[in-house]
Image: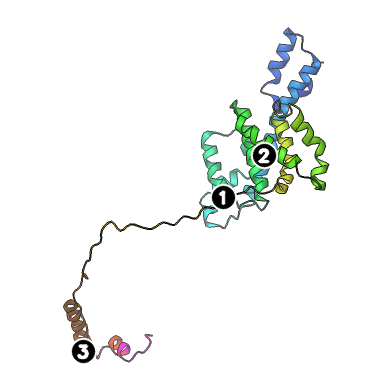
Amino acid sequence: MSNFTPYQTTQFASFAPAALAAERLYAIDPAVCALGCRRAEEPAALRRELAEGMAAQIAGLNRRGFAVRLHLREVERFSSAEAYERLTYENVLQLEELAALLPPAAEDAAAVQFDTLLYGMELALLAGRSYAGARRDLLRKARAIAAVAHIPAIERKRAFLDRLLRTDYVETAGVGRLEEIRRELRDLIKYLPPRERAVYTVDLTDEVVFSQWRGAELESDDLADYRERVNYYIRQHRNEEVIRKLHANAGAR
């Protein structure tokens, strides 16, 4: 039995055959194999979860809304998690448009911002980009949470916070571990004391560069002539039904 036999499924079809072939040539330690397969499985599991969550949100859009009807074909398509299996660049652009139709999150804004921070780190890790600044921000938030005392929710996560702050837990984190950090800490962000914000009062005065006076486009004589012409027309057609009703202030039927 191969170390990779449990991974001979459609989920890992992209790398399992190559791994089996490599194992025939090189001696692969089972522990290393298990660790590598677990790391490969983490992004796939997270991807499924995100796809299912996005599909559920899009499926919940009101099809009768005007903006939604403009994208009805895309809404129907991306309401299924299977539609996210092989996304093209065009699909990504379509999803960006659909994301703008989703209602704002009803959760605490600080928790949503923390989600954004961790999702950005996960994306950077998968893309091979540096996220040192985001990592420092995460550790700063974790230290601030750990400094808050006498909150039962924080005390229950005290061991996790200690491991995060006193080991290389964040520095060596993969996608799965970053997702664990997001889930463990997102509900604790609301306990952080608000940052002190400097208040600036700005008094602006508009400078008059130039001024110019312009007369009316219609002179009073022109208005008088127009009024006279209207009155003349009414006098000449006073016996017509419409003019008679207007003159008598009666409603038209």
Label 3 – label 2 distance at C-alpha: 77 Å
User: If the image is split into quadrants, where does the C terminus sit?
Assistant: bottom left
Give the residue number, with chain letter if any, for mark 1. Answer: 198
Give the residue number, with chain letter if any, for mark 2. Answer: 50
Amino acid of disc 1:
Ala
Give the residue number, with chain letter if any, for mark 3. Answer: 235
Closest to the camera, between mark 1 and mark 3, is 1
User: If the image is split into quadrants, where does the N terminus sit?
Assistant: top right
**Figure check: 124 above or below 69:** above
Nearest the eye: 114 or 242: 114
Residue 8, how many percent across, how many down?
74, 23
Residue 181, how many percent across, how many down?
73, 36
Amino acid of disc 2:
Leu
Label 1 – label 3 distance at C-alpha: 72 Å
* Colour basis: rainbow
Residue 174, how many percent across, how many down?
70, 28
- The tag earlier along the polypeptide, 1 or 3, is 1
Nearest the eye: 154 or 124: 154
Q: Are marks 3 and 2 in contact (CB under 8 Å)?
A: no
SS state under label 3: helix
The residue at the point 66 percent across, 42 percent down is 114
Closest to the camera, between mark 1 and mark 2, is 1
SS state under label 1: loop
The residue at the point 71 percent across, 45 percent down is 189
**Figure check: 150 above or below 240:** above
Q: Please tell me how crowded label 3 is: few (under 14), some (14-19), or many (20+) other residues with Cα within 10 Å.
A: few
Region rendered in magenta: 245-251
Q: Is residue 205 visible?
A: yes
Left or right: residue 91 compared with residue 183: left
Q: Is residue 85 visible?
A: no
